Amino acid sequence: MALLTIDLNALAANYRTIAARVAPARAAGVVKADGYGLGAVPVADALYRAGCRDFFVALTGEAHALRPTLPADARLFVLNGIAPGEEAALVDADAIPVLNCPADIARWGAAARINGRRLPAALQVDSGMSRLGLAPAEVAAIAADPRLLADIDVVLVMSHLACGDEPGSAANEAQRARFDELASMLPHAPRSLANSGGSFLDGGFHGDLVRPGIALYGGAPQEDRPNPMRPVVALDARIVQWRDVPAGTGVGYGLTSVADHDRRIATLSYGYADGWPRMLSNRGAAYVAGVRAPIAGRVSMDSICIDVTGVPLDLLVATPHAELIGPHQTIDRVAADAGTIAYEILTSLRHRHARRIVALREQEDATCGS
Ligand SMILES: *Cc1c(COP(=O)(O)O)cnc(C)c1O
């Protein structure tokens, strides 16, 4: 069996690192896409115990699944607005939708009147990414007609950085200025702009609440900077067999890997159906007993061949598993080899094999909430 290990102590430590960095701003936890593929329930529980009280998912269904597991004082935001017909489900989940457009505002106002009480919401403005949020003209229209928000309790005004992971980008400063300008036209409420990358920009980007995701899970928050986060994920795949392959012999589908020397090839029980990118065919590596073993040939659905010629035979024989993610190979390294980002690597991993969750240690637990 392959084994995906998720270290909740490292996750909690990463949360505390960010919370300490941005104080007096508070840190939320972004747990959309099932906690970036690691399991939203254990992830949110560990974050809560580390002091997190604000959680972000993308979808109403995600909020519904998570809400019953969260204590009552945890706030749960839904980033992707209100899909038509989901108002009641959001109210039912005690979720706080992020209103991204005038139609969202109208829907939530109508839901409030049906429920006979004002309903909480976050307002998102587009400060320059052109993805989600109220356009400047829509913000101006709301400012001119406050009745549009009469039934809505605005608990957060937010926007999102396009280049938060690029500390040198001039776009960050431009977005911050635009955000401040737009937010000041809306009802007074706590402000939130920064994702993981933004949390590592200067304090002017932190507002009242930062919204880290990838950094909590061990991904590098900013490019071209040392990664200050602790790794959270390890992935080990079972070595099914190995064989000696003479020079000139092809390996895998299409026989795309051929060498002019004898090789030793091991086959792992892990493949693209498990979430390992097929793009890593003849690219990237696994590690066996700490020795780099390049991927040889195409990644198959359920298996990957690796070149273990450099692994001493006694070590190979004694090593049942190869490391795909772990001390020798970060999620950012795998992503770079595959031409993608760590987010996609994590959210692609399936739960077809065993998952081991390293529970929070009591000692670390005891410091929670601080
Ligand atoms: C996904 C997301 C985040 C978290 O982003 P990271 O880069 O993972 O830190 C924060 N805010 C919004 C609006 C998002 O969509």
Image: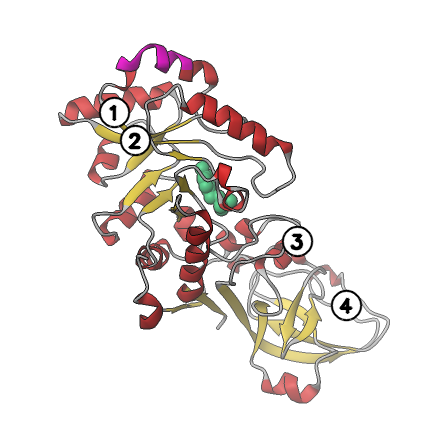
Residue plotted at (64% across, 83% down): 316
Estimate how packed mark 2 is, as few (under 14), some (14 to 19) or many (20 or more) residues with alpha carbons within 10 Å: many
Q: Which region is colored magenta?
A: 140-147
Q: Secondary structure at mark 4?
A: loop
Query: Residue 28, position in %: x, y?
Result: 38, 46
Which mark, residue 222?
Answer: none
Image position of 341 (left or right of 47): right
Which residue carries the number 1 mark? 152
Query: Residue 99, position in %: x, y?
Result: 35, 28
Q: Eyeballing the image, is 11 above or below 55? A: below
Q: Secondary structure at mark 1?
A: strand
Residue plotted at (53% across, 57% down): 275
Query: Residue 280, position in %: x, y?
Result: 66, 57
Amino acid type, callout 1 = Ile
N-terminal of the pair, mark 4 or mark 2, is: 2
N-terminal of the pair, mark 4 or mark 1, is: 1
Which residue carries the number 4 mark? 250
Query: Residue 264, position in %: x, y?
Result: 73, 78
Image position of 359 (left or right of 348): left
Amino acid type, callout 2 = Ala
The residues bearing labels 1 and 2 have C-alpha atoms spaced at a distance of 7 Å
The answer to whether residue 353 shows anywhere in this view is: no
Disc 1 to disc 2: CB gap under 8 Å: yes
